[in-house]
Amino acid sequence: MLKYLLRHLVSGSHSRNLGHQGACFRVELLESRSLPSATLIADINPTGPSVPQNLVTFGSYIYFTAEDSIHGRELWRSDGTAGGTTLVADLAVGSAGSNPQSLTPSGGWLYFTAYHPDVGVELWRTNGTVTQLVEDINPGTSSSNPSGLTNVQGTLFFAATRHGQGTELWRTTATGALLVSDLVPGPESSAPNHLTNVQGILFFTAWTPTHGRELWKSDGTSTGTQLVADINQVVPVPPLGSSNLGSDPQYLVNIAGTLYFSANDGLHGKELWKTNGTSTGTLLVADIVAGPKGSYPAWLTNVHGTIFFSANAPAHGRELWRSDGFATGTQLVRNIHVGTGSSYPQQLVNAGGLLYFVANDGNRGHEVWRSDGTSSGTFLLRDIRLGFGSSYPADLRELNGGIVFTAEDGIRGRELWRSLGQPADTFLLDDVLPGSNGSQPAELTNYQGKLLFRAQDDAGDLEPYVLDTTATAILSVIGPNPRFYKRGDLLEVRVILSNPVRVNIAGGTPAIALQIGSRVRLANYIPSQGSNILVFRYQVRPDDLDLDSIRILSPILLRGSTILGPAHNPIGLTFSPPDTSGVLVDGVAPRIRVVQGPRPGIYRYGDILEFSVLTSEPIYWQHPSREKPYLEIIIGRSAQRAYLATGDGTDRLVFRYRIQRGDNAPAGIWLRERIFLNGGRLEDAAGNLLYLNFPTPNLRRIRIIT
């Protein structure tokens, strides 16, 4: 301890303050990050690009459309391997292809629209083995052109056109398809749009001559298909021959059973609304721009019950807003483009409880940002294309607790990027096609923790690729604050991983080894399932001592446990230890080595009795009440107090007592065998309390005569 104190006193810092400095955590990023590399799944079209589109996970496969050199554009599927990539069905025999669209899983089937020369564009379905026409809704070779395919608890709803009935709402049955309701009888169309599932009820917008385009709901029956509310009864602008434009609801999103959307009631302009499915429960949330102009909310996105959206207000331009569903909780998150200019937030995505989006702050172009709903927690993740130029991030998708997206950095062309929510964890995921042209990735899809997408090679051949992002790596390790740690204090180590993991401690508890002096101690894992942050803690023991800084040792020790990332892949356990200089441990409580009394002799009124308490290390006096510690001296039949006088910060505490009239001890004095704190504290630099008891010295030759 003395060596440490001298070292810091020479450097100009008072040793006692070390235990109280407000130091911050240091984040030590790994010097290199081992990244996966994308591989071509299959060259579907050997003579040209197959251009995979409409990628969707169904069952244990990814389904998509592609064009080979024989069948035209048809439905394919893949398990991420060349051998597992096959044509599902050749619906339109020949090279023309059926051009499947709108691939939507529902009730054990994958539904899609496709062209067949005998029936036109109709609704089809497949389970991977059987592929069949659902119904020739518009009989003959004319097409019903199904659109808005939406799964509602295993039933598929959609809009379709039948001759003489126009475009109306339909749903699937066990054997085919059924018209739900002909909202506008005759050849005119209600043209259902924005189909949205809200806890088993379908909400959608539809046009009728009476109400214009308004919000409707349906339980799949004709009688259960009803107007929710005639929101706009004011605006007399006639679309399609209507005398009422309607509120034109848009950006429908379900948040815990409440539907949020933007709409125009004719008085407030386009603003944020909500509904519980009843007319009286359909309410304006907030009039952001007072009057009929409106703020035009867009990109409505649910992040753990909070709705984020972009809105346009004269004082700020189009910026990021949030709402809890009430006017008082609807507020600007941050004016990203300072002033009245607009940052145009777009492509809003929820991943891991954070909002990711693209915005332009006016200085760094269109780049990727994140927000936790606060102004300070809303910031640029990386200026991928430096300066005013834009990287134009696109295809933002949630993947394993973060996002993947494509961006153009001005050097590599458009390639794959990733972010885990911090600038240091926003990086190039893979340079699929080295060089300046870029692989132009698109159709990014999460398949069992892997990323499937289409990309081009140097010849411009667009084919399916797979990138195994399930390998979980340690991105950074955060050590304890640099300060003194005393007996009972916790040393905490946090490990940041590239993916959320699950820790199974049935067979043991993971740990990280700490080198504390000459001993190796184990910081044990603190359970927190499903997180990408692992916390390890160690409680300082009474015999721990390291005044030259502890060390954190790699790797993570499993000790019978398992730590698994996505797709049940084990994580990498090795890491680069963080800098732990200044993390000092002293769990050894100081002790009293000896107590020395005054020199033998006769002492009289007014004399000073001085007692020296020598300790095993420097001791500091904490006295919030200003009352001093003392030794109790027995003089004759009286008990007197010798108060602490000097020695704060040293290993020699001096207590003094001035002899009073009436003090008489001709046969000597003696001390009680402990220090009395008197409301204060005596501790070492780490904060360990001094053991107060000591062997009493022989003071019989200290005689007092007054």
Image (spheres, rainbow, N blue to C red):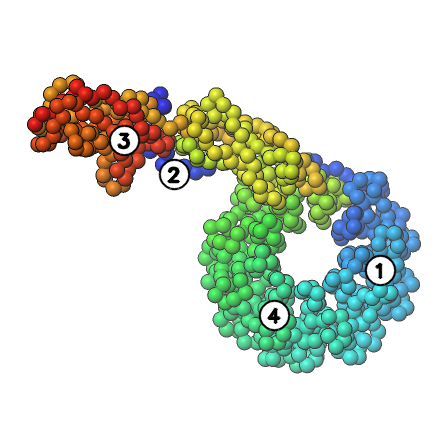
Q: Residues within 10 Å of mark 3 (few under 14, many from 20)?
A: many
| Disc 2 from disc 3: Cα separation | 32 Å
| Amino acid type of the residue tagged 3 in the rendering | Ile
| Disc 2 from disc 4: Cα separation | 49 Å
What residue is drawn where x is 45% and y is 57%? 339
Q: Secondary structure at mark 1?
A: strand
| Disc 4 from disc 1: Cα separation | 33 Å
In the picture provided, is 297 more to the left or to the right than 158?
left
Residue under pointer 1: 124
Q: Are marks 4 and 1 in contact (CB under 8 Å)?
A: no
| Amino acid type of the residue tagged 4 in the rendering | Thr
Image vertical order of residue 408 relative to residue 230, above or below: above
Mark earlier in primary sequence (2, 1): 2
Would residue 433 be seen by someone viewing this image from the given angle?
Answer: no
Mark earlier in primary sequence (2, 4): 2
Residue under pointer 3: 675
Image vertical order of residue 311 relative to residue 71, above or below: below
Closest to the observer, 313 or 694 = 694
Residue 523 lies, in percent from the top left, at 53, 32
- Answer with the quarter of the image where residue 6 lies: top left
Closest to the observer, 505 or 331 = 505
Mark earlier in primary sequence (3, 1): 1
| Disc 3 from disc 1: Cα separation | 90 Å
Q: Secondary structure at mark 3?
A: strand
Closest to the observer, 55 or 484 = 484
Residue under pointer 2: 22
The tag on residue 275 is 4
Q: Secondary structure at mark 4?
A: strand
